Image (tube, rainbow, N blue to C red):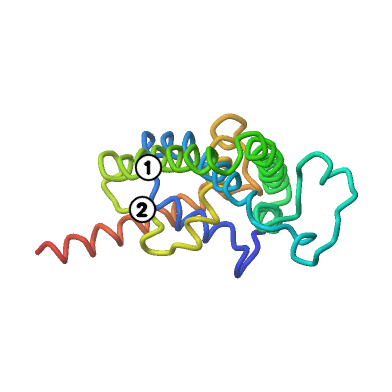
Amino acid sequence: MGRKGLFDLEKHFAFYGAYHSNPVNILIHTVFVWPIFFTSLVLLYFTPSICQLFNVQPQCFLASHGLFLNLGFFFALLYAGFYVCMDIKAGSLAALLCMACWVGSSLLARHLGFSLAWKVVLAAQLFCWTGQFLGHGIFEKRAPALLDNLVQAFLMAPFFVLFEVLQSVFGYEPYPGFHATVQKRIDAEIADWKEKKQKKMS
């Protein structure tokens, strides 16, 4: 059985899947979503850590290796916790990737320095976002999900593309019948969207 409310996996995937049903658009998002998450963490590395805010000198393994409990850490932790709450198995893998992105982005940001890092982040974000908007405009022929639900779209995107890979490669589903149920909801939402679109045009 799936969870309900905030952690309703079927609801989240039906919403996101209704905006990403074209295979080419799904592939584009699979390639570009995680780099957007990663490069966002690169920039967030330069936010103050808890130790700096409370004027405490950190003496620990993490700090000695350039890892700080800053906004980037809590951003990655929020995503990781949300995914685990939605599905233990796939969510744990997604959480591991989130924290690995935090570590990798911290090391990269430390190496680049702020003056170079923000330029790299800007270029990567522009490239990845442009690719995704083109995917929606050319292949999906539907506006991105973020225009209808910004928070849900941003939160679900990394998990959605990972879930797509797990399902396509390993046939994974959190419980029997999950994908069939979600696909029905996706088909219904797409049909509803097309009907509303047709009414606006007529």
Indicate the quadrant where residue 201 lies: bottom left
* Residue furthest left as drawn: 202
Residue marked by disc 2: 144
User: Residue at the spot x=23%, y=64% of the render?
Assistant: 196
Q: Where is residue 4 in the image (x, y as percent from the top left)?
A: 62, 67
Indicate the quadrant where residue 8 lies: bottom right
Residue type at mark 2: give it.
Pro
Q: Position of residue 194 (x, y in %)?
A: 25, 57
Disc 2 + disc 1, Cβ < 8 Å: yes
Q: Which of 31 and 56 is in front in this view?
A: 56
Q: With 182 as the anchor, is 85 left or right in this view?
A: right
**Up/down of 127 relative to 57, above or below:** above
User: Residue at the spot x=37%, y=59% of the render?
Assistant: 189
Q: How far apart are marks 2 and 1 (CA)?
A: 8 Å
Q: Where is residue 103 in the image (x, y as percent from the top left)?
A: 71, 40
Residue marked by disc 1: 132
Q: Position of residue 190 (x, y in %)?
A: 33, 55
Q: Is mark 1 on a helix, strand or loop?
A: helix
User: Which comes before the other along the chain, label 2 or label 1?
Assistant: 1
